[in-house]
Image (spheres, rainbow, N blue to C red):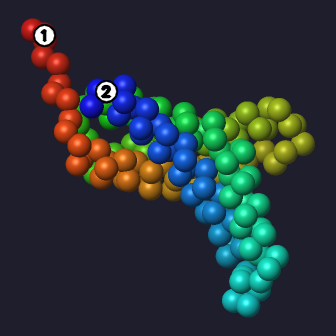
Amino acid sequence: MSRADAMKRTTLTFLGLGPLIGGISIFAQFVVVEHPLALAELFSFGMIWMVIFFAIGGYVVGAVPAAATGLLFSFVASRRALNLLESILLGAGAGFLTSVMAVVVIVLLNPGAPKWNWIIPLAGALAGTLCSGLCRILEGKRSRLPAKNFHD
């Protein structure tokens, strides 16, 4: 496999899974921490629609930060071989940074928005962690290209 194919596969993995993980983690944080509900209320018809809404909203809002995180992760991961812990930390850091940039853009575009919200950057870090771990496990099974030597 070429390096460009691996970068494309990694970016598409982040783009596919990142917003879904982020939307569901924002929903879980909203339901569990902000407004704790009874177990019967969690599995009600309205809550199922809320989960669907947050998953779709995660894709709408989180597609650009997820693609940026995947591109950043794949660029760094294609330059050197990373072990699982390094790739998880890199994915979490990249997800956090791109989500912070998304929050800054939202605040700049909408001055009436809350000035800071930790939910979105933490959801980005969680999504980056899970996606980078999955990509490292999947890419570890494929053969890596040898690093270029100075004399090449």
Question: What residue sits 72% from the left and 82% below the top?
Answer: 42
Q: Quadrant of the N terminus?
A: top left
Tell me the residue that label 2 is attached to. 3
Tell me the residue that label 1 is attached to. 152
Q: Find residue 18 and report its horizontal and vertical position in percent.
A: 55, 50
**Helix or strand or loop: what does disc 1 sit on?**
loop
The answer to whether residue 34 is visible is: no
Query: Mark 1 belongs to which amino acid?
Result: Asp
Q: Find residue 109 and report its horizontal and vertical position in percent.
A: 83, 32
Q: Find residue 134 and report its horizontal and vertical position in percent.
A: 38, 53
The image's mark for residue 42 is none
Quarter of the image where one finds residue 54: bottom right
For label 1, the crowd category at 10 Å Cα-Cα, with few meaning under 14, some 14 to 19 and many 20 or more, is few
Q: Find residue 53 and report its horizontal and vertical position in percent.
A: 76, 61
Vertical side of 64 occupied by 55: above or below? below
Question: What residue sits 13% from the left and 10% below the top?
Answer: 152
Label 1 – label 2 distance at C-alpha: 17 Å
Q: Nearer the viewer, residue 73 or 34?
A: 73
Quarter of the image where one finds residue 144: top left
Question: What residue sits 67% from the left and 38% below the top?
Answer: 102
Vertical side of 38 occupied by 99: above or below? above
The answer to whether residue 23 is visible is: yes
